[in-house]
């Protein structure tokens, strides 16, 4: 019998690097101050600001659904990038607050934005979701599997939070942030540094048989302040930069004390812009990094071409970060 010739699988060839072309954000209309929370639970403005640094947060109204917020943020990112929807061929939506597992919202978001038949899917890596998705977008472009990618982080954490529980209700919030990623000759997104500590998977969870989130706050605080500096260092080393090269530090907006602890350990001084979006926005999980970057760009504190170190971390426990050039 004649032996069949062995076929060779061919691979696409992508661009040398990937870069963020545009950012966009959406914040719900309703502002919820600490003073308002004082009227419904045993808490105070001083207690909240001392422990987590939040002065107010945004809670979504009924019409501000995950899809609506994602579309709003994605549309702004597209406009900022200068691309038309038909130039996008992959949409990744990072979220940990979908109340129904099927269908995912990635295809819906793409359709609403006028993106025609792209690859589209959802990703759940908790509060690290945006940075996981950004790494995947960069890799897809460099391998040639995509030309332009829309990455969205969107959350309605109020849907999965007991709004009378001061341990979580004072922290979690809603919103969406997005980035359009495209090819570049010079890399604008560094290698992703990611990892997980699954032995602590119950530290942040919606336990079986329940519908709201619980969090072991002290355990998460210890993990974030003792374990994650190594991930940030790895992200910088992999990108070939040092702390002295970083213009902007925009970690997940979970706790102001954690943000400032990380900045101090990395040796960031006055010349480094530190994102403190948590003060006005609360913890928006997968939306927090792109929302923080968007706010810094809009305020002028960060500018085009700045080198930013970003990090997401949360439920899982998961972590991911990279160095990026701002658009």
Image (cartoon, rainbow, N blue to C red):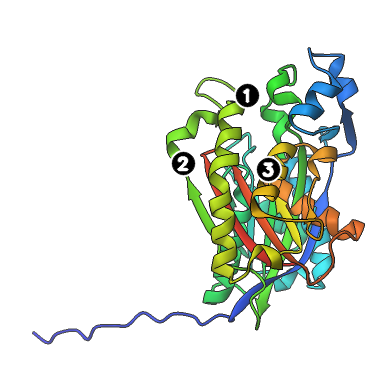
Residue under the point 44% across and 39% down: 198
Query: Which mark is nearer the camera, 3 or 1?
Result: 3
* Quadrant where the image shows the N terminus: bottom left
Q: From the viewer's perspective, is residue 304 above or below residue 209?
A: below
Q: CA distance from mark 3 to mark 1?
A: 29 Å
* Quadrant where the image shows the C terminus: bottom right
Mark 1 is surrounded, within 10 Å at the Cα level, by few (under 14), some (14 to 19) or many (20 or more) other residues, namely some
In the figure, is residue 199 to the left or right of 307?
left
Q: Is disc 3 placed on a helix, strand or loop? A: helix
- Disc 1 marks which residue? 212
* Residue 291 position in % (x across, y down): 78, 50
- The foreground one among 301 and 145 is 301
Q: Is disc 2 placed on a helix, strand or loop? A: loop
Q: From the viewer's perspective, is residue 307 above or below residue 173?
A: below
Q: Are marks 2 and 3 in contact (CB under 8 Å)?
A: no
- Disc 3 marks which residue? 261
- The foreground one among 278 and 26 is 278
Q: Quadrant of residue 259?
A: top right
Q: From the viewer's perspective, is residue 42 above or below residue 151?
A: above
Residue under the point 65% across and 54% down: 266
Residue 197 image label: 2
């Amino acid at each position: 019998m004649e032996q069949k010739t062995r076929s060779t699988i061919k691979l696409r060839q992508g661009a040398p690097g990937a870069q963020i072309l545009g950012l966009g954000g959406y914040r719900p209309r309703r502002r919820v101050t600490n003073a308002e929370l004082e009227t419904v639970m045993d808490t105070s403005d001083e207690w909240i600001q001392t422990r987590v640094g939040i002065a107010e947060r945004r809670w979504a109204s009924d019409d501000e659904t995950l899809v609506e917020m994602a579309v709003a943020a994605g549309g702004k990112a597209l406009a900022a990038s200068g691309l038309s929807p038909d130039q996008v061929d992959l949409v990744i939506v990072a979220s940990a607050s979908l109340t129904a597992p099927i269908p995912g919202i990635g295809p819906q978001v793409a359709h609403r934005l006028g993106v025609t038949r792209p690859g589209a899917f959802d990703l759940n890596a908790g509060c690290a979701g945006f940075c996981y998705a950004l790494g995947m977008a960069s890799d897809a472009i460099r391998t040639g599997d995509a030309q332009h990618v829309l990455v969205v982080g969107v959350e309605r954490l109020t849907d999965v939070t007991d709004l009378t529980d001061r341990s979580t209700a004072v922290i979690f919030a809603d919103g969406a942030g997005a980035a359009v990623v495209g090819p570049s000759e010079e890399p604008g997104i560094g290698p992703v540094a990611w990892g997980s500590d699954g032995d602590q998977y119950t530290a942040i969870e919606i336990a079986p048989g329940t519908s709201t989130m619980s969090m072991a706050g002290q355990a998460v605080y210890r993990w974030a302040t003792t374990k994650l500096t190594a991930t940030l260092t790895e992200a910088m080393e992999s990108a070939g930069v040092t702390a002295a090269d970083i213009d902007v530090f925009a970690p997940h907006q979970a706790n102001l004390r954690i943000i400032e602890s990380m900045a101090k350990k990395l040796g960031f001084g006055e010349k480094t812009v530190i994102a403190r979006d948590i003060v006005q926005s609360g913890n928006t999980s997968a939306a927090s990094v792109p929302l923080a970057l968007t706010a810094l760009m809009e305020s002028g504190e960060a500018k085009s071409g700045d080198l930013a170190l970003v990090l997401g971390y949360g439920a899982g426990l998961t972590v991911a970060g990279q160095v990026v050039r701002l658009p």
